[in-house]
Amino acid sequence: MVDNIYVIEGNPVSWKEAIQMTADELYKNGCVEADFYQNCIKREQMYPTGLATLVPVAIPHAESCCSIHKNGICLLRLATPVSFHRMDNTQEELPVDFVLNLAVMDGAVQLRALQNTINLFQDKEFQSDIRKLKLQQLKKVFVDKWKPES
């Protein structure tokens, strides 16, 4: 189960800076070790996570065994889109509006979390308001709709 959910916003200028912002939030809240950021970067370079969902999102994460103390998720709403390489076509870049960094210790839970995230960002009801909501409202909507199985 993922109980530690953080929602932030920012204006990073690169995909690396976007991952840094989410990793810093997870680190600040005791979910991950300091090297989690580097583990996410390495994985993103090998296996890009940009998804062309209704609301474009990237889902960077480290391997489930690396640098994680407790399960956590950080959702970053971007002021302006940042380009990530696409998951389905790694040669192509995709400007994303959100970055959702997963810090999950168990591989099976991580897979369910990834599936839930993809489904959520394809949900028309969810995507209609998420760019405009205040941050606390966005967190409530996100938590209510994103219900990973334990």
Image: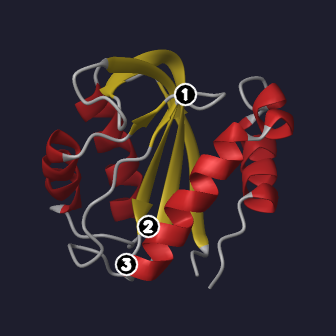
Residue 59, given in percent of the width and then of the height, sits at 43, 46
Left or right of 8 in this view: 102: left
Q: Residue furthest top?
A: 80
Q: Tag 1 or tag 2, which sits nearer the N-term?
A: 2
89 or 82, which lies in front? 89
Quarter holding residue 86: top left
Query: Horizontal and vertical percent for residue 144?
Result: 81, 60
Total label count?
3
**Residue at numbered disc 3:** 107
Picture coordinates of residue 16 (x, y %)?
A: 24, 33
Q: What is the C-alpha distance between the residues marked 2 and 3? A: 21 Å
Residue at screen point 19% across, 52% down: 43
Residue appearing at x 63%, y 59% in the figure = 116
Residue type, mark 2 in image: Asn
Which colouring convention does the figure follow?
secondary structure
Whole-number angstrom distance, CA of label 2 to CA of label 1: 26 Å
Residue 128 left/right relative to 114: right
Q: Residue at x 15, y 40 (%)?
A: 45
Q: Earlier in the sequence, mark 2 or mark 3?
A: 2
- Picture quarter with the C terminus: bottom right
Q: Circle 1 — which element?
A: loop
Compared to 61, does 67 lie above or below?
Answer: below
Q: Nearer the viewer, mark 2 or mark 3?
A: 3
Crowdedness near tag 1: few (<14), some (14–19) or many (≥20) residues, C-alpha within 10 Å = many
Disc 1 designates what residue? 56
Badge 2 is on which residue? 29
Q: Position of residue 105 (x, y in %)?
A: 36, 80
Q: Nearer the viewer, residue 8 or 85?
A: 85
